[in-house]
Image: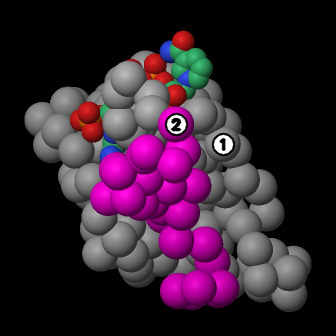
Amino acid sequence: MKGTEQRVAVITGASQGLGLEIARVYARHDIGLIVTARGADALDQAASELRELTTVEALAGDVGDSSHAERLIQRGLERFGRIDILVNNASTLGATPLPELADYPLDDLTQAFQVNTVAPPPPGATHAPRDETARSRGHYQRIVRCGC
Ligand SMILES: NC(=O)c1ccc[n+]([C@@H]2O[C@H](COP(=O)([O-])OP(=O)(O)OC[C@H]3O[C@@H](n4cnc5c(N)ncnc54)[C@H](OP(=O)(O)O)[C@@H]3O)[C@@H](O)[C@H]2O)c1
């Protein structure tokens, strides 16, 4: 584990595409990474690459599953002791073709909100980062939202 001065980011959907590109940029800036995606093999491959540049905690799972999202944050905090940045990159379109809101199946709508907006749970709901400024605000220092 690196010193507590190292900033730490959690990135959802980091096994490929935009999430992996963001992870690569952060890794080059020596930001510690907590990464997740559903496919374990692709995530392991991405994590191996990123570990050549920075410290990485990887946990495969679906961020639509709130227990996975909470485990992810917990594992990250155990590893790093802080989380400064949330990159909510994984997303789902939900029901397709997109129905009118009144006709949207509730389970699909709930899943879309969980993946796109809620997960991983915000600091304050489950933990407070060690960083004094962030803790006093009760928030991540930065939240990046990539999806729809
Ligand atoms: N590509 C574009 O042109 C574009 C344009 C505007 C916005 N965006 C947004 O940018 C984000 C990334 O796009 P992309 O093109 O890079 O996507 P992508 O190549 O399909 O990658 C999506 C990543 O998210 C993971 N993922 C998907 N659902 C997940 C879930 N429920 N839980 C955990 N991980 C999950 C995928 O891995 P697994 O499948 O293994 O879980 C993968 O690592 C999306 O939010 C997208 O809406 C993309």
Quarter of the image with the C terminus is top right
The residue labelled by disc 2 is: 100
The residue lying toward the viewer, choosing from 30 and 15, is 15
Stretch of the chain drawn in magenta: 100-128
Residue 30: in magenta span:
no
Determine the secondary structure under disc 1: strand
Left or right, residue 108 beside residue 5: left
Badge 2 local density, few (<14 within 10 Å), some, or many (20+)? Answer: few
Left or right, residue 59 beside residue 51: left
- Which percent across, then down, holds residue 42? 20, 31
Task: Name the residue: 57% across, 34% down.
Answer: 147
Q: Report whether residue 67 is seen.
A: yes
Task: Name the residue: 52% across, 37% down.
Answer: 100
**How was the colour assigned to the protein in this rendering?**
one colour
Q: Residue furthest front?
A: 102
- Which percent across, then down, holds residue 43? 25, 38
Question: What is the distance, in whole Å, between disc 2 and disc 1 at their CAs?
Answer: 24 Å
The residue lying toward the viewer, choosing from 19 and 90, is 90
Write down the quadrant of residue 137 in the picture. Answer: bottom right
Residue 127: in magenta span:
yes
- Which percent across, then down, holds residue 120? 48, 64
Query: Please, what is the three-letter code of the amino acid marked with disc 2?
Result: Glu
Task: Name the residue: 65% across, 85% down.
Answer: 124
As drawn, the label of residue 145 is 1
